[in-house]
Amino acid sequence: MDPRTFAFYTDHAAEIARRYESVVSPVERYFAQAFTPGARVLDVGCGSGRDAARLLASGYDAYGIEPVEALRLAAVVAHPELAGRIGKGGLPRTGDAFGGEFDGILCSAVLMHVPDTDLLDAALAIRRLLKPGGRLLLSITASRGDLLSGDRDANGRLFAPYSADEVSLLLERLGFVLISRWESDDVLGRSGTSWTTLLLERRSGGQLRPIDQIESILNRDRKEATYKFALIRALAEIATQEARCAVWSGGGRVGVPIQRIAERWLLYYWPVLAHPDKIPQSRAEAAGGKPLKFRSALSALMEPFAQQGAHAGLTAWHLARTSDQLDAASRSRLQAALRSIAETIRSGPVTFSGSGLGVGPVFGYDTASRLVLMPTELWREFSLLGHWIADAVVVRWAALTQQIARRQDLDAGGVLPLLLARPEATRSVQLARAAYLDAGASLCTWSSRPLKGTLAVDHVIPFALWGNNDLWNLVPADPKVNLSKSDKLPASELLEESKHRIVASWGVLRDRLPEAFGCQAQVLAGEPLPKTGAWADKLFSRFREAVEFTALQRGVERWSVNGSR
């Protein structure tokens, strides 16, 4: 506590105690929501003992600490049941505080008396006193109308102008999560004074938030290869683009099919392995030792396409696969490559990610379901911040490659284009265009304008956002309308208005390219679609989710056909 504030409370303890006891506790209404029945709760800065007594009367194992001796004495006089339950201590110097290990802490109308230089130590002290999973109920002034000189009132008491958002952020950075927030007037009726009450919980398993776990894997984990970057990138992209493939397995865990991660890895590593200068992706490779575990299998898959365009025929292979034109040998090599990649994922980054955290592996693997498992909070982080995480990982991946390949004088700037390479969009839409022309597609998806023999193929979710050439994302459009839409997302109303034309387009592609359309649609839907019945409604629902989530999370401009007719 600030020295001048401490002096005021010492000199006026009796008056202050009477004032506090004259009103009902403003935070008592939150006790039941904040703390479990019978919880061991500490009131930090307990003052007259009013709140500690109410906690005790409500069935909690309540204790209090207070730095002002006169207030400690007044508390026991007013509430004899608190004898032996009130100790010396305040923020940031809490003392023994009855051994700590509390299920809950109440810190009401205290933090504003802590100087800025002590705020971090005060927050750390609170954290030390709480068990993992413990709750903190904290109230702080939202406004005061009686501050006369800087941050002090007429009596010289410090009222540091911490905002609730500032305090909440500080605590979240120390491993707390915000659960609830309430605003209230001053129970003492002071003009211009109002309060904010926060309920936070200390996370279990250390102070790391999910984003800190990701950062620690990327920054602190030892990396013998680029595998951990590939895993984090794949999970970030799957969370934002294939969210329905996630399996909520209970027990606070989410599973992602290892097959979906392996499919992503195949596309990531193909351009790198195809480069004429052997670009090592592990320290062992760079030193002339063992190659990547799946290099041989992936190279065998690439070999027949090596002379068919950029990156050893990546686009040619993708077109052949999408059009169901892979021969039996290529199909076999594809499955062998995916098996080898999946085993590398399981035995490598899934097993060892989190070694720098000191709290054990972050991921797990279920052999029966072939799911890569992670805490639900981590999956939420991938879902909310996936596009940022993926972009950051690519840059770090390039930097690690430069470090691994330092003997080759390789620059990260030369690696980035390889990590960002994808099957070419202009060639990948050829299949959809051919199918639409063959079916005699006659109307623009967005404007219903007659196509009159010419059509463009529009990426509903722009290629610039997702890099996605899946058939469900490709619809016929008037060339001028398509040019107007460009890299925008269709407005919600337009999407609904165009549903029947989108579904008709899917029907064309499903009839002509059934295997490719079915596999790609299953990824979006998160489950196999029925061959008959309401398959289109199910797919359209997931399609709308993808568009709306992308618009909100990426801040993408929405587009309407108005003005393009």
Image (cartoon, rainbow, N blue to C red):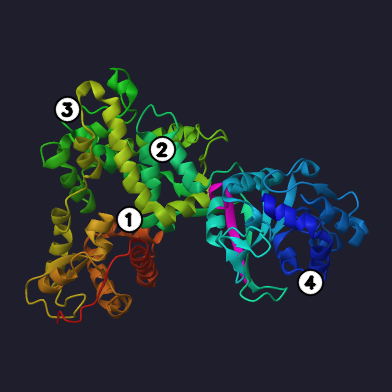
The spot of residue 391 in percent (x, y) is 31, 47
Q: Nearer the viewer, mark 3 or mark 2?
A: 2
Judge by depth and name the residue closer to the eye, 292 or 557.
Answer: 557
Circle 1/circle 4 CB separation < 8 Å: no
Q: Which residue is mark 1?
A: 519
For residue 24, which numbered disc appears in the image? 4
Q: N-terminal of the two: label 4 or label 2?
A: 4
Sequence-wise, the earlier of marks 1 and 4 is 4
Horizontal side, residue 8 vs residue 191: left or right: right
Tell me which segment is drawn in magenta: 171-183
Identify the residue at horizontal 15%, vertical 70% (top origin): 482
Give how far apart the Cα atoms at labels 4 and 3 are: 76 Å
Mark 3 crowd level (few <14, some 14–19, many ≥20, 10 Å Cα): few
Q: Which mark is residue 56?
A: none
Q: CA distance from mark 3 to mark 2?
A: 26 Å
Q: Which residue is mark 2?
A: 218
Q: Nearer the viewer, mark 1 or mark 2?
A: 2
Q: Which mark is residue 277?
A: 3
Q: Which amino acid type is marked by label 2? A: Leu
Please, is residue 391 above or below residue 216 in the view? below
Looking at the image, is 193 positioned above or below residue 348?
below
Q: Is residue 138 magenta?
A: no
